[in-house]
Amino acid sequence: MTLCAMRKFYRLLENKMKRIYVTGDSHVSCLRKAWDLIKKFEDDYLKFDFTIAILANAHDLRRDFFEDKGTYAKFTSPKIRISQLPDRNNFDFYGFSMPYYTNSFFGNGDWRYFIPYCMKGEMFPLSNSLIEQAVLAELKYIIKFIDIFIRNNHKVFVVESPKPFIDNRAIIRKHISEELVLYLDTFYRNIVDRELEKRNVPVVKVPKESLDNMGFMKMSFRLDREDDAHHANAEHGRIMVKGIQDLCSKWPVRLGLKQEPCDTNKNNRPVVEDLGPSQYA
Amino acid sequence: MSDHPYVNIPEKAHWRKAIQGKHSLDVTDWYTKKFPIGKKSIATAGSCFAQHIGSALKQNGYNYVDVEPAPKFLARELWQDYGYGMYSARFGNIYTSRQLLQLVLRALGEFSPNENAWKKNGGFVDPFRPTIEPIPFSSIDELEVLRNSHLSQVVKMFEMADLFVFTLGLTETWLSKSDGAAFPLCPGTAGGEFDAGRYNFLNLTYRDVITDMRLFFRKARDINPKLKFMLTVSPVPLMATATNQNVAVATMKSKSILRAAAGYLADSYQWVDYFPSFEIISSHVMRSQFYNPDMRTISSHGVRHVMKQFFKEHPILTTSVGNANSNDQDIDDALCDEEILSAFGE
């Protein structure tokens, strides 16, 4: 047994190490890269054992990708390589990087022709309710998937996906305005926040310090690949992994409320309050 | 035998030859077109039956005008809830000639109704499109921005269309006492509150319908002098009547007025045609076979039979194919797949 492995073994015994399973869309990649580096070089973080695995790309997770079998989800999408979750590996915590993927929404080319009613522009104005329903339609399978875990009393959290980078394809290639991209991204995330809040699911948020003055991700966290203005790098992943560890360390104290699945259409506070239309008029 | 006008009438004009002894589905020559449509741009509006006409035109390759198309990021199953894909603009159902006339006047800025918004469930609805969205608008500002955009698109629709198809549905309507604004639904049923001091009931007469439609034609042709019209009458009976009559009796009166008016208008103007969907469905010749068990709504077989008669005179151009998906998702998938490979080596 190597020295590193021995250290890890004794720390496991010492801290009764908890096991965290994180899965979701391609944004788990930066978490995985970060964790690989942490394991190699940073003993201090070995409070938890992470398993970080890709489930499917974001588009496949926005279609019907599973059957609800009561205590688990049986995957029906051919793009998903595992058969079910939870499986026999009974993890202490389940984390999902799925709901905050906003890129396919604000990146839809039709945003060249439509605009939220509160923003100025020549395009067709849309009501907040319509935009909200469009977002909820995207999220419905993901929320039902998370509800399975909640229903079966697993400890569930969500990892927020990176915010857009300023050189996002929607802005550069499709000429959707920066202002509109940020508005839609924030609108979408507020809806996800609300749905998770209703279910008492905590979220590991992208820290404000990771954002520039406008609200885009700082370019220092951008993946070092020219054609990819979408994914974040291992440095961002490291910040989020630390956030996950902090959350899981405080779990019983931080959360006094039981996690419960609930109806998406009930008890919805207006999303628009959080945005303050005056910011975008 | 002496010569007289009935000697040389065509077969279709003779009951014994056209109808008697024939299976109802074998009755032909319901309609002879007044003018060809061909590749003309066609806009539709009207009561709920008009949705079937628009849908059939789209599916059969006609150049259908839609000035307020649905955004692609809105799930298809939500389109109808938000008034998309039903007519050539998001006006919702237009049941009466009065409503149609006031729509074009409002779009031209020639009529601004006093009633701007109705309260409903903590929000607001547009009195002239109260069911255009399933959730009330959060503010009057939101309602007005959307309405103003809609009305400007209505003008554009008249500019773009070569033919406007309108299905007359009702004669019964509720008006504002203050300015005569006609509402598609009685106040209090889908928003607002009913107040007998503010609203009155009007059962449009034959003269009212003719007057409304003549003025409507004038206004629409002021926008587009080449615009032609096709009128139909909805065979769908009234859901309810405010006349204190039996609803079947009220229905017959209403449809009779509308049918007579539509016929008169088609006879009066060379650029107005009448298509007899009303007769094809509801004539006793058809034995009510195309009504669903509720004796109101029309079965899909009925809609197909009606459109079959239409396409005999206006041939099918092509059958439409679904729009190709953009390659946006493919590019995003490629980026995501590449990042997954780099992290997980999968």
Image (cartoon, helix red, strand yellow):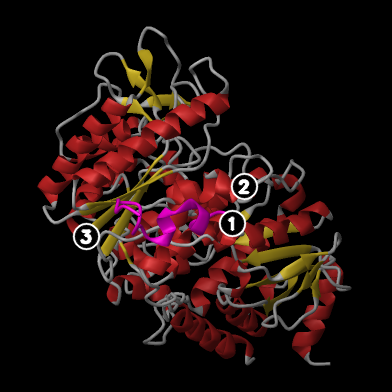
**CA separation in Å, label 3 and label 1:** 34 Å
Q: Which chain carries label 3?
A: B
SS for dot 1:
helix
**Tag 3 residue:** B162
Residue B265 pos. (x, y %): 25, 42
Locate residue A108: give its quadrant: bottom left
Labels 3 and 2 within one chain: yes
Residue B260 pos. (x, y %): 35, 36
Q: Which amino acid does label 1 sit on?
A: Ser
Q: Residue B24 carries which label?
A: 1
Is B193 magenta? The answer is no
The mark nearer the N terminus, 3 or 1, is 1
Q: Is residue B62 left or right of residue A69?
A: left
Between residues A199 and B297, which one lies in front from this camera angle?
A: B297
Labels 3 and 1 within one chain: yes
**Tag 2 residue:** B287
The mark nearer the N terminus, 1 or 2, is 1
Q: In this view, does A84 lie above or below B159?
A: below
Q: Is residue A1 above or below residue B225?
A: below
Between residues B5 and A32, which one lies in front from this camera angle?
A: B5
Q: Is residue B318 left or right of residue B100?
A: right
Name the residue: 34% across, 20% down. B175
Residue extent of the magenta highlight: B1-21
Q: Which amino acid does label 2 sit on?
A: Arg
Q: Is the magenta stretch mostly helix, strand or loop?
A: loop
**Residues at circles 1 and 2 in contact by the CB criterion of under 8 Å:** yes
Q: Residues within 10 Å of mark 3 (few under 14, many from 20)?
A: many
Is B8 magenta? The answer is yes
Picture quarter with the C terminus of chain A: top left
**CA separation in Å, label 1 and label 2:** 8 Å
